[in-house]
Image (cartoon, rainbow, N blue to C red):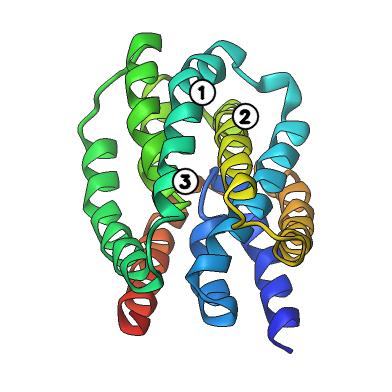
Amino acid sequence: MTWLFVLALALIAGTIGGLIGFGSSLILMPALVLAVGPLEAVPMIAIAGLMANLSRMAVWWREVEWRVAAVFSATAAPAAALGARTFVALDARTLQLTLGFFFVAMIPARRWLLASGFRIGLPGMALVGAGIGLLSGLVTTVGPINTPFFLAYGLVKGAFVSTEAAASALMGLSKAGVFQSFGALPPETLAKGVAVGTALTAGSWASKHLMARIDAAHFTYLMDAVLLVAASIMLTTA
């Protein structure tokens, strides 16, 4: 019953993530932490998130801004590997506390970035990639704080979702390699991650038919609520 719930939640999370470009990992993380603990949940999310991002790329393939994805990933991918290496050295309680406080901090940080009206070019995306890549390796999900930078470059709708997904997929490959190298991704964990990723992928494809009907701004308060709930679960269990 636990895994039926997780897979159903993954389908919903994949649909929401496909619509607004982030949120899948945030929605899933608390459920997976409660089901398997944070040390197994983070590598699972890395695999599932990689599959979801690849599916978003496939859905909006023709709209990917490859230059942006390449410049961002050039610094984000190695930084994500460094963050993932740091993650495997953390104990479960420290990880849960880190995740909880980070989720809380993302609420005002995302709102400030969106409200500031700043613009960013390719050199700026390279600088941002290093910081976000490091955070991604440590806390797995950085979508809410990652999003404003891609929007500030001028990407919208399909171009935004696909380009952010391409950059995140490259970070995901980097993290998965580190987790595998340090024994944090045994076959059982990999299989669970693939199962969750399959449900996320199905949600991503379903979201394409809803994109034209739903304004992403409607999800702003929903994502803040998800962040608060996720943070509360992490801090309480820690």
Q: Which residue is mark 2?
A: 166
Is residue 126 shown above or below 100?
above
- The answer to the question of whether label 1 and label 2 lie on touching residues, with beta carbons closer than 8 A, is yes
Task: Give x and y (percent) for residue 10.
Answer: 67, 65
Can residue 77 be seen here? The reply is yes
* Foreground pick, 143 / 42: 42
Task: Give x and y (percent) for residue 32.
Answer: 57, 73
Task: Give x and y (percent) for residue 132.
Answer: 38, 36
* Foreground pick, 18 / 192: 192
Q: Which residue is mark 3?
A: 84
Can residue 28 be seen here? The reply is no
- 2 or 3: tag closer to the N-terminus: 3
Residue occupying image coordinates x 40% and y 11%: 122
* Foreground pick, 176 / 14: 176
Is residue 178 shown above or below 121?
below
Tag nearer the camera, 2 or 3: 3
Q: Which residue is mark 1?
A: 73
- 1 or 3: tag closer to the N-terminus: 1
Residue occupying image coordinates x 60% and y 30%: 170
Q: CA distance from mark 2 to mark 3?
A: 19 Å
Q: CA distance from mark 1 to mark 3?
A: 15 Å
* 86 sits left or right of 107 in the view: right
Tag nearer the camera, 1 or 2: 1
